Image: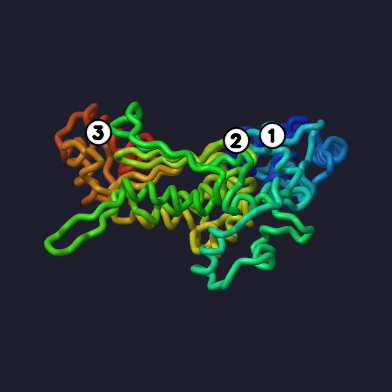
């Protein structure tokens, strides 16, 4: 048995036309490998047919069925005494790559047809463009807000066309692009901005709502941060000193918000949604991960595939974001000393970041939850049986409390079955 399938590795017991969808997906988005002679569980079964003849058939099927034909390599290899065919496909530059008139992408271990929005993005990529590179709908744009930020952060005296060209907001062919329009003081076209809701005790009670659109991304960013500070930053008097306290780390919110703006898709009518609760903030960014990056790479790899490199470049010059690809690490760092930890959820159509409050009292830990929390604080890992033995809780009570702490992202499961243990999120 070898490694299980994932988004860039697929197994086939035999050669059939179904692998051609995966060829399209790999060529459109990321390098990938298909191994023939292995079942879905990673068991080496070998090929019944002549491997050399099958390799030639695979090559002919790709050349006859894919438009344009991507770069690929085929080799025959013996593993566990059985002959396999290994097919490696490279991400191509001439996207989209079609199979029978349709283009595909990977969704976990499956290859699925892309929608018309994604097809348009691939077509732009194929001519070395992003959506933000497209011509703006207006050539009458003002950049006073951007100018103020550049004077402060970059030391320029005033903004001019040469600086806009340097920032790639004005195309060499003589027009503003979509990135320029989004960073201009006003944009009258239907770009969706940020929708912010502050809830009370529950989602049925809305204390405040603000929709921010048709203004510079810089204005949107600043307004959202101002609203955050109204609800989650406060001053406490300690003797003669006035101490500023943060219910949620300000820098974690700023980083999450900047991440949402820089990585979202702009060619869809969806707002960045910010839901502010008493115990957490949820930020939903439309568009999922950029092509060519896995969830693991996004969360742990400190790498970045930029969906909007022009906008990201401006945010970087203005010191709103630092080195590309470090945002998740920076968010996690803000919670180093906190009981609760941030949570990241990645799906095909959105990225959700949850920032919990850091004040222990506001997490509403029950007395029993606090017992298990303090216990795990003193131990690296404990099994449920060990927790039962130390606390005196019965099995059902321990499971209920443990699951509650997991839901609050305070503890995590390690392993499974008889080896299952629990530990604090650090």
Residue at position x 52%, y 41% in the image: 285
Which numbered disc, 3 or 2, marks the residue that appears first in the sequence? 2
The quadrant in which the N terminus is found is top right
Percent position of residue 369, x then y: 21, 38
Does any portion of residue 67 appear in the rendered image? yes
Distance from the alpha carbon under mark 1 to that under mark 3:
42 Å
Q: Quadrant of residue 120?
A: top right
Instruction: Tell me whether the residue at label 3 lies in contact with that at label 2, contact meaning CB atoms closer than 8 angstroms.
Output: no
Mark 1 element type: loop
Rendered residue at 67%/34% (across/down) = 111
Q: Nearer the viewer, mark 1 or mark 2?
A: 2
Which circle's residue, 1 or 2, is located before the other in the chain? 1
Q: Is residue 342 left or right of residue 386?
A: right
Residue 167 in the image: above or below residue 59: below
Q: Which residue is mark 2?
A: 269
Q: Nearer the viewer, residue 336 or 243?
A: 243
Q: Which mark is residue 114?
A: 1
Image position of 297 (left or right of 26): left
| Residue designated by label 3 | 401
């Amino acid at each position: 048995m070898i490694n299980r399938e994932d988004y860039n590795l697929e197994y086939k017991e035999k050669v059939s036309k179904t692998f051609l969808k995966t060829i399209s997906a790999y060529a459109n988005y990321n390098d990938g490998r298909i191994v023939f002679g292995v079942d879905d569980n990673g068991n080496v079964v070998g090929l019944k047919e002549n491997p050399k003849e099958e390799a030639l058939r695979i090559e002919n099927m790709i050349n006859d069925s894919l438009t344009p034909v991507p770069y690929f390599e085929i080799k025959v290899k013996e593993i566990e005494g059985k002959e396999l065919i290994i097919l490696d496909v490279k991400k191509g530059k001439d996207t989209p790559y079609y199979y029978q008139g349709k283009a595909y992408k990977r969704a976990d271990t499956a290859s699925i047809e892309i929608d018309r929005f994604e097809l348009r993005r691939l077509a732009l990529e194929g001519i070395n463009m992003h959506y933000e590179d497209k011509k703006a709908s207006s050539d009458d744009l003002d950049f006073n807000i951007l100018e103020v930020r550049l004077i402060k952060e970059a030391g320029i005296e005033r903004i001019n066309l040469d600086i806009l060209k340097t920032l790639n907001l004005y195309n060499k062919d003589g027009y503003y692009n979509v990135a320029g329009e989004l960073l201009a003081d006003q944009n009258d076209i239907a770009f969706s901005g940020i929708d912010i809701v502050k809830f009370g005790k529950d989602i049925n009670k809305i204390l405040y709502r603000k929709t921010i659109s048709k203004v510079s991304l810089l204005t949107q960013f600043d307004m959202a941060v101002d609203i955050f500070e109204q609800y989650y930053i406060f001053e406490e008097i300690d003797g003669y000193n006035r101490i500023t306290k943060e219910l949620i780390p300000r820098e974690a919110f700023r980083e999450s918000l900047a991440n949402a703006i820089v990585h979202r898709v702009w060619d869809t009518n969806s707002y960045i949604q910010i839901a502010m609760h008493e115990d957490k903030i949820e930020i939903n960014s439309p568009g999922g991960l950029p092509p060519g990056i896995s969830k693991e790479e996004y969360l742990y790899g400190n790498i970045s595939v930029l969906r909007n490199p022009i906008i990201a470049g401006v945010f970087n010059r203005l010191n709103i974001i630092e080195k590309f690809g470090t945002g998740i690490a920076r968010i996690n760092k803000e919670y180093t000393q906190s009981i609760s930890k941030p949570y990241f959820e990645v799906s095909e159509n959105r990225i959700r970041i949850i920032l919990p409050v850091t004040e222990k009292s506001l997490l509403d830990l029950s007395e029993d939850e606090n017992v298990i929390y303090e216990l795990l604080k003193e131990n690296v890992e404990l099994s449920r049986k060990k927790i039962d033995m130390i606390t005196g809780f019965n099995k059902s009570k321990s499971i209920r409390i443990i699951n509650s702490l997991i839901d609050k992202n305070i503890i995590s499961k390690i392993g499974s079955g008889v080896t299952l243990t629990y530990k604090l999120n650090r």
